[in-house]
Amino acid sequence: MTEPIPEKPKRRARYSGRNPRHFHEKYKELQPDRYPDDVAKVISGGKTPAGTHRPIMTAEILRVLAPRPGEVAVDCTLGYGGHARALLAAVQPGGRLLGLDADPIELPKTEARLRGLGFPPESIVARRLNFAGLRGFLAAEAPEGADVLLADLGLSSMQIDDPARGFSFKTAGPLDMRMNPTRGRPASALLSELGESGLAQILAENADEPHARDIAGAILRAHAHEPLTTTQALAAVVYEACARLPVVPEDVARRVFQALRIAVNDEFGVLAEFLRTLPTCLKPGGRVAILSFHSGEDRRVKSAFKEGLRDGSYASIAEDVVRASAEEKRDNPRSSSAKLRFAVRA
């Protein structure tokens, strides 16, 4: 009786050239510790490696926040941890970095990454929390308030690039868009709840879409015929609707996805609550910097800072918006739309 021939172990899929198309094929970029040279090549080409995020305007943020040793720094949107890492280093020795993020998928990875840098364990506190709950978080961790505080309102590259999150129309995935996939309803379910006027209002208010009514009608007619449950199904409907309009289809698709993401996550409601309680979260003389990436966010930040200056909550605010340098825009195109505003607590 012959022994059974053991099965050969399956070969790992070959890396798909220098620029693999699909997220799951980019395993070298997803393992920067094992493939640093490959990751460096991606960065040198002006791109962001899959599964990572390149912090925007770090030097400008450090300049306006001026963190000092021993201070309490708060990063309200930890993301990949690039800004947090810079703040954490700046408040040593003796300082602490308090970090928040609502994303249950990325937060544990980022906390592990920060703790692996060798800073004192007690200098890092990370909590899964939406930054609208900042005041309650600080009441427990830093009752006197923060010395410096940063909120980066942009979507992280890890979220944009992962098809499973459904944030981008450039890759196939479920039409989800939730920052926290365990809570709320996905974008596909939101479409089932909206009428044409409601969707048009979302497109106009959340993304300044000039053809909101036409686009909303096309989306909901298609959704009624066959539910739109994938990113590419929605994008196809938007592109078809754009054929009858004097527009650039890709720009319209970007605005539609932005508007739905904001609605799914109630981003403007969260931002309003954050801005309302923000002055009470800062020590006297505390500094806050906020990075925004579209006009709806920037208008709200600008208005809140001006109101705070008028009522005496802030001693000073940024006179002009700060933009990324030409060099950074060239090296990291995702920084092109970033706007930085800052204020100092009275």
Image (spheres, rainbow, N blue to C red):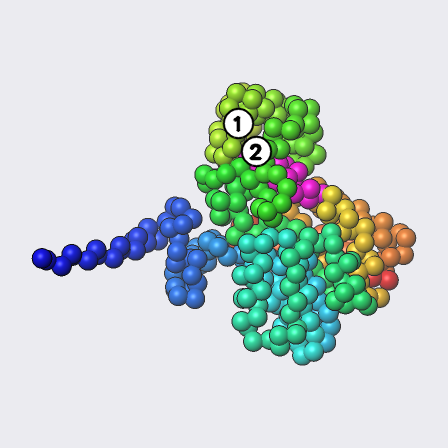
Q: Is residue 61 visible?
A: no
Percent coordinates x, y for residue 192 in the rendering: 61, 28
Q: In this view of the protein, which residue sits in the foreground, 162 or 102?
A: 102
Query: Circle 2 sits in a helix, a strand or a loop, which is it?
Result: helix
On the picture, is 284 further left or further right than 196?
A: right
Task: Give the spatial CA distance, label 2 vs label 1.
Answer: 8 Å
Mark 1 nearby-residue class (10 Å; few <14, some 14–19, many ≥20): some
- Give the secondary structure at mark 1: loop
Report the number of numbered marks.
2
On the image, the x and y values in percent for residue 25 come to: 37, 50
Quarter residue 139 falls in: bottom right
Q: Amino acid at mark 2?
A: Ser
Q: Is residue 85 above or below residue 160?
A: below
Which quarter of the rendering shows the C terminus?
bottom right
Report if residue 89 lies within the magenta region: no
Q: Is residue 63 above or below residue 335?
A: below
Query: Toward the viewer: 230 or 311?
Result: 230
Among all residues in the image, which is located at the extreme right? Answer: 311
Identify the residue under disc 2. Answer: 188
Q: Which label is found at residue 227?
A: 1
Specify start and end residues of the magenta stretch as a single range. 252-268
| Residue at x 73% of width, y 69% of height | 72
146 lies above or below 119: above
